[in-house]
Amino acid sequence: MMSVSVYRLIVLDRDGPVPVYKQIAEILRDRIDSGELAPGNPMPSEAQLEAEYGIARTTARRVARELREQGLVYTVQGEGTFVGDQAAPRVRRKKPLYQEIAEEVAQRIRRQEFKPNRAIPSEKALMKQYGVAKVTVRLAVGFLRDQGYVFTVPHRGTYVSSPDNWPQD
């Protein structure tokens, strides 16, 4: 028996009258209607939409907003956008995404990739590295701050704390 792979060729009309974000929202709507994106499952992240469709972050956000307005998805701050309505059980990560990011940054601090009294990467750099929204990065940095790994100086940045302030294993 021969195995057949199906590839979907998606061509966006970037010069036509229908905005690109509406075209992408329609593609995702079709994926939801077909069951490929099932209720409770996460939608592709902003970073995934950027990479897959060659769009800007603001366009990816408009796609999510369009689908929310159509009642097809909902967003949980710091966790992502999910198919269906909020009453539907969602497939959760073992840990919230912001905690996973914070733990990875904490490991880098412990390995001394980021040294005490030196800045950690900026919000923009972390957003780009992890493909997440600003609020997710801010939650991660807040988590690191609460644990004692970092401190923030307004209008300057976030810096690695002295190892004396870090949680003991």
Image (cartoon, rainbow, N blue to C red):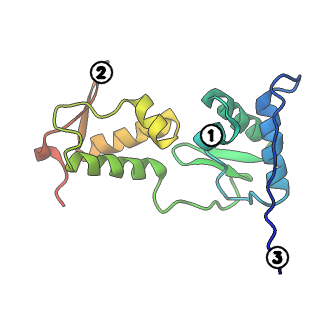
Closer to us: mark 2 or mark 1? 1
Instruction: Where is residue 77? Give x, y as percent.
Output: 55, 42
133 and 88: which is toward the camera: 133
Q: Where residue 71 sits: x, y (%)?
A: 79, 44
Q: Which residue sits at x=30%, y=44%?
A: 144
Distance between the Cα atoms at labels 2 and 1? 33 Å
Check disc 3 and give the amino acid type: Met
Q: Answer above or below: position of 141 versus 92.
A: above
**Which label number is shown at residue 154?**
2
Q: Which residue is mark 1?
A: 51
Instruction: First in sequence, mark 1 or 3: give its number.
Output: 3
Cα gap from disc 1 to disc 3, whole angstroms: 31 Å
* Secondary structure at numbered mark 3: loop
Which disc, if any, is residue 2?
3
Q: Secondary structure at mark 1?
A: helix
Q: Is residue 82 left or right of residue 148?
A: right
Residue drawn at (81%, 68%) of the image: 4
Image quarter of the C terminus: bottom left
